Every structure is written in structure tokens, then in C-alpha cells.
Amino acid sequence: MGKYFKYAIGEILLVVIGILIALQINNWNENRKNTIAEYKMVDKMISQAKADSLLFDIRIEGTIHIDTLFGHYIAINQDSSNAYSKIYYSGELSPFVKLNDGSNLIRNHTEDFKQISNLELREELMQYAYLVTMMDRATELLNKNLQDYIIPLELEYYEALKPYDSTSTLGEMKAIFKNPKMEAHFELIRGLSINVKNQIEILQNKNHSVLKDLTNHRETLK
């Protein structure tokens, strides 16, 4: 009888060990599947972050162009000299009807952030999302003022601006731009464009950090 009980206990232990091994293998397989899925997701995030970086560079160039353009307009108001004889009119007061906003990474992967196993990286991605929101708000404010002030200004001065085109210099148009009403609007738009530029540059710095950390995290998932 004692040998029988020992044999039965041994059989039970073997069954339990077998079950534990099977569970361990199953957990390992599930973890491996999750790791592979996360690797693919992070790889896509890296591509979107790289796309964001290029996009932000273009937007920064756009804000610099606005800053320069409206800076010329303001300077004409403050200087009666013909210093702008070699700077040509674009054909309209502002060549930008609207600056684009948003982020490829945020637009396509916000819901995926919670699946990142690295908690510090997950927190950094949430900070990135917040900075995108700040950039979007600044851009929206600039777009609204371009629409509310510059387009009506072009309509108001349509007849005065009509004789001029891209072959005209700002020096030739000095009499039109030397106008307190225009200067006030130009100062507003220039200030808003500088704010957008600052927000994008902050976001661009965070983009470089996020891209580096996403790449490092991808290496840990191999």
C-alpha cells in the first residue's frame, strides 16, 4: 500500500509539473507574440516620428517666411527710405491662407501608447501629445487671425494693390504699406507666427528625444 501511495503521489507530481511547464510555455508564447506585436508597432511609430520631424522643419520654414515678410511690411511703416527696392511683392499680402497643424505620430498612434511596455517611454509619448496640442492651438490662432484680418485687408485695399504683382518691389509699394492700420495687423500676425515657430521648435526637440528612445526600445524588443 505504501508503494502504491508513493507511486500515486509521484504520478500527481508529474502531472502538476507537466501542467506548470505547459502553462510556462504558453505564457512564453503569449509574451513572445506580444513582444513581436509591440516591435512592429514601435517600428511604425519610428517611421511616423521621422515624418513628423520633416513636417516640423517645413512648418518652421513657413513661420520664418511669414516673420520675414511681415517684418518687411512693418519696417516700411517705420522707415521712409527705399531700402526695399530689391525685395519683390509676392502678389498678395500673405502667401499663406492657412498653416497645417497636427502630427502623424499622434494622429495614427495615440491609442497605441498604452501598449508600450516601457512606462517612461509611454510617459514621454504623452508629453509629446501635449506639445502637439500646444502647437495646434498656436497654429489655429494664427490661422484664425490670417483669415479674420489679412484676407479682409486684401479686400479693403484690393484696388490699391491691383496694379502690383510679383514684378513689383516693396519699395515701389511703400505708400500702401506705410499705413498705421496695416502695421497693427502686421504686428499681430508676426507675433502669432513667432509663437507658432517657438511651439514647433519645442516640439521638434521633443521629437528628436522620442525618436531616439523609440529606437532604443525597439532594440530591446528584438
Image (cartoon, grey):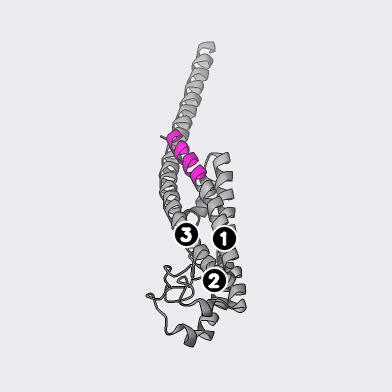
Instruction: Give the residue number, with chain letter if any, for mark 3.
Output: 59
Which one is nearer the viewer's eye here, 194 or 164? 164
Residue 166 figure quarter: bottom left
Instruction: Give the residue number, with chain letter if any, for mark 2.
Output: 76
Asked which secondary structure carries label 2, the reply is helix
Residue 152 figure quarter: bottom right
User: Vertically, is 162 above or below 209?
Assistant: below
**Residue extending furthest toward the bottom:** 159
Mark pair 3, 2: CA separation: 26 Å
**Residue extending furthest toward the front:** 81
Picture coordinates of residue 154, whole percent (x, y): 51, 81
Picture coordinates of residue 47, whole percent (x, y): 40, 49
Is 209 inside the magenta-drawn segment?
yes
Going by the numbered disc 3, the residue's amino acid type is: Arg
Going by the numbered disc 2, the residue's amino acid type is: Ile
Say if residue 101 shows up in the picture. no
Q: Pointer 1: residues within 10 angstroms few (<14), some, or many (20+)?
A: some
Name the N-terminal-most of marks 3 and 1: 3
Classify residue 210 as left or right of residue 181: left
Q: For the residues carrying marks 3 and 1, which lies nearer the camera in this image?
A: 1
Q: Which residue is drawn at the image coordinates 44% and 70% (left, top)?
A: 85
Name the N-terminal-most of marks 2 and 1: 2
Q: Are marks 3 and 1 in contact (CB under 8 Å)?
A: no
Q: Pointer 3: residues within 10 angstroms few (<14), some, or many (20+)?
A: some
Instruction: Give the residue number, with chain letter if any, for mark 1.
Output: 194
Write the start and end of the magenta stretch as one range. 208-222
Q: Pointer 2: residues within 10 angstroms few (<14), some, or many (20+)?
A: many
Asked which secondary structure carries label 1, the reply is helix
Going by the numbered disc 1, the residue's amino acid type is: Ile
